[in-house]
Structure formats: C-alpha cells, structure tokens
Image (cartoon, rainbow, N blue to C red):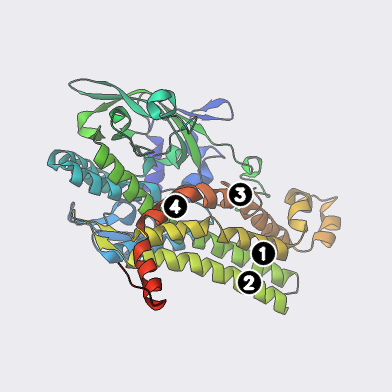
Amino acid sequence: MKTAEEYLSSLRDRALVLWIDGQRVDDPVDHPKVRPAINAVAETYRLAHDPEHAALATAHSELTGGAVNRFTHIFRQPEDLIRKIELQRILGRITGTCFQRCVGMDGLNALFIATWEAGPEAHARFLDWLVGVQERDEVICGAMTDPKGDRSRRPAEQPDHYLRVVARDADGIVIRGAKIHQTGAANAHQILVMPGAAMRPGEEDFAVAAAVAADAPGVTMILGRQPSDERKGGPDAGNCRYCGQEVVVLFEDVRVPWSRVFIDGDLAASATLLEAFAGYHRASYGGCKPGNLDVLIGASAALAREHGVDGAHHVKDKLIEMAHLTETIHGVGLAASARSTRHGSGVWQVDPILANVCKQNVTRLPYEIVRLAEDLAGGMMATMPSLADLDHPEIGPRLRAIIGSEARGRLLRLVEFMTYGAGAVPLRIECMHGAGSPQAQRIVIQRHIDWQARIEAARRLAGLENP
Ligand code: SF4
Ligand code: FE
C-alpha cells in the first residue's frame, strides 16, 4: 500500500492536461488551487499506515491475497460496509471537506456486481483490472454524470450531452463526450467512466463502462471554480489544510483497449451498475457528511467559548440540535449498511430504501445545521476584515482590540468556509446534489417501499377484509 508521500510522487508522473482559470497548468501537484485537494486524498493513504486507524483503513483482499487500502476493497462481508461508513466519518472529520476517493470505491463494487451479471468474460476483464488497481493502490475517479442538456430529450437526440462509443475496431473502442462534477479527477490515476442514466434499447452506444488513465490522450480536465479560490493558501482560507475538488472532464475520441472495456451496450448490466452505485454512494454520505458536520459543530462550540456564551442554555440547546441531526444522518448510513444483503456475486449491498433515505436526509438536515451554525457564529462571520489585517503592524493592534483573539477570527473564517458558500465545494450544494439530486432518491424509495403491505396492515386494524 502506498504511503501519502508515495501517492504524491505518483501524481507527478502523469502528463495530465488540466486547465485552471483559463490557463493550462503544467504542474498541478503544487498548484495552490489543487494541492489542498490532493492533501485531502492523501489522508486516505496516511490512515492506512497510521497504527490508530490502519485496521479501519485497510482490508484483506481475496484477489491479491494481501492487505489493500479500503478504498480499493470489495465489500465481501456486511462489516465492510459498516467500516466504510466509520472510516468516512473519521476522514470527514480530519479533512472537513470531501476527500474524493469514495466514488471510485463505490464504483468498483458496483461494477463487480454488474460485470458478474454481464457474464464471465466481462467479469474476468474487470477482475484483471481491479487486481492492478489494488496492487498499485490507485485513486479511481468514478465518472458518471453526463451534462444531459435538455432533460426532455433522449441521449440519441443530443449525443454531445452524453458520453458514448463512437467507434469500435479489433483493438478496442473510441469514446467521446464529457462528464461533469468529477470529484477529485485531477488527483486520480484512472477514470472509470460509467453510464449516467438508465439506457433504453437503441441507446447501446451510451451504455459503456470503461477505464482510462487520467492522462490518456484525448482527456482534458477543467477545474471547477470555487468561491474560496482566491483565499487558498492565505490567512482567510477558512480550512487552512484541505479542500475538495470538482472537475469537468472532456473525452475527445479517447481510445480504450478491449481489456479495459467492461460494459459495451449491455443495457441490463448498465442498469445494475447505475442502481448499485447509487445505493453505495448515497449511504456513503452517511459517513463523510457527519464527519464534516462534526467540524462545524466543533467550530460553533469553540466560538461559543470565545464569545463567553458556552454556558447559556439556548447555546447548548442549539449545539445539541446540531449533534442530534448529524447523528440522525450517520445512524441511517450505518443502518443501510447493517441491513445489507448478499448479491449472487458475493458482494454485499446496502439496503436500498435506507441508503436513499440517508441521502434524502442529507439534502435537508445539514441546511438546519448550517442555519444553527450561522446563528451561533454571529454576523461577524460575514463582515470581518481579512485576517491579514490583524497582522499588519499599523492596523493590526487596533483591529485585534475589536475582533478579539486570532482564534476567534480563524474560527469565524472556518464557519464561513463551511456554511454560506465560501467552502471549497459549498457543503450545502454538495449535500443537495452529490450522489444524486433529491428527486432521484424519492424515485428509488417509491419503487422499493411495499405499499400494499402497509395498506393491508391498516385495513386489518380498521376491521376490513384484505383481498
Ligand atoms: Fe467521499 Fe463524501 Fe466526497 Fe463522495 S462527497 S467522494 S462520499 S467524501
Ligand atoms: Fe460527493
């Protein structure tokens, strides 16, 4: 397993095509808008070698016969799903942001299931690739979301808005299109493209799952603009160590050899992949988001002390409410994992209703938590001058007398970073749309709830016959 330092140096070996703010960047690893995001991913490597966390951060792989980083592991037992959530909470608390490696992990597991259903040939190709991913301990960017364009039109009516196969020959396929909201793409070794929607007969070219190197010819990345960009590396960064990363990735006639094509036109396998991935990743939000919210609760509690109001009943009550809502999210993520079932492939799957309820809660409860954090922080979190002014020999001492301690200033910046949008990827927006927008979860919940059983329970108690 790689160490954090080895991960960093492995990124330098890539010939990545990355654009930031209208400029091609040659050395992304040291770029101030990229490095904090790389630092967040690096924590997933560091924990694997940290005696305190190694048991959680690593797992035994039946494929390699040795220990692997949990982010490349296949869920072979229910405990693997629970440990994933627990690990995500720890990493969410350490980084206070998105550490970017879960999309790949959830994608690997979903693809294990989908290729098993697709047949022995597809599954063998996938396993061969997976062994390499585990041995090299790679970051896999799970690339699912197509731009989608006009939602009322099918992919074939607007092909440029969906990634698709444009050519096939004896050696492999050629893919064209784009993927948006690509978490951690510029910090990854490989990109796993997956269909972003259920495809219908006639849309086989869009039902493709394949792996390409992050620096494969034809792959171009454009870094997402973040409200906190100008502050990175400076005193007003808020989170002075880490940030998340979202990227637009263009695939302009990227060649993929058959050995890295796992699904090509198999609509059933493609649908399995989509649903399995959605379940895993929606439960994942029951891990990382509570970890992030722990930081916000901590910042609010620390500020209450700075303000001398930590003994006030209404302050304590607001902090309790923030903790209660955070544990509610985490509890459902754990429950979705505890009530798992074994797929025929041997991979364990989360409970689909609870996984989607978990993510649905994440589209709501953090909004209340953020409201309470803003309430407790006070207006200064939005109106405070730069912390650079605090250090200025002329204005600094006079300003300090007003703002109070540097600790207060830094904590206010952290709350600002995590709440009203200054954050790397604003926490609330990620909670709303990451792992699927709210309506996507409601569709799955609607489909999996046994409505008839509920009607029959009610009719029986109302003294009515059930047909
Ligand atoms: Fe992992 Fe959460 Fe980031 Fe998704 S949003 S990659 S689950 S940290
Ligand atoms: Fe996400």
Residue mark closest to the camera, 2 vs 3: 2
Q: Is mark 1 within 8 Å of ligand 1?
A: no
The dot on residue 441 is 4
Among numbered discs 4 and 3, the one appearing first in the sequence: 3
Identify which amino acid the numbered label 2 is placed on: Leu
Q: Would you place residue 149 above or below residue 181 in this image?
A: above
Q: Quadrant of the C terminus?
A: bottom left
- Residue sticking out furthest to the left: 120
Residue mark closest to the camera, 4 vs 2: 4
Q: Are marks 4 and 3 in contact (CB under 8 Å)?
A: no
Identify which amino acid the numbered label 3 is placed on: Gly
For mark 4, give the secondary structure.
helix
Residue under circle 2? 319
Q: Nearer the viewer, residue 167 or 231?
A: 167
For mark 2, give the secondary structure.
helix
Identify which amino acid the numbered label 4 is placed on: Gln
Identify which amino acid the numbered label 1 is placed on: Leu
Q: Quadrant of residue 451?
A: bottom left
Q: Would you place residue 43 above or below residue 218 in this image?
A: below
Among numbered discs 1 and 4, the one appearing first in the sequence: 1
Residue under circle 1? 372
Q: Residue at x 35, y 69 (%)?
A: 456
Among numbered discs 2 and 1, the one appearing first in the sequence: 2
Q: Are marks 2 and 1 in contact (CB under 8 Å)?
A: yes
CA separation in Å, label 1 and label 4: 26 Å
Residue under circle 3? 423
For mark 3, give the secondary structure.
loop
> Residue 14 location in percent, x, y?
38, 33
CA separation in Å, label 3 and label 1: 17 Å
Q: Nearer the viewer, residue 357 or 96?
A: 357
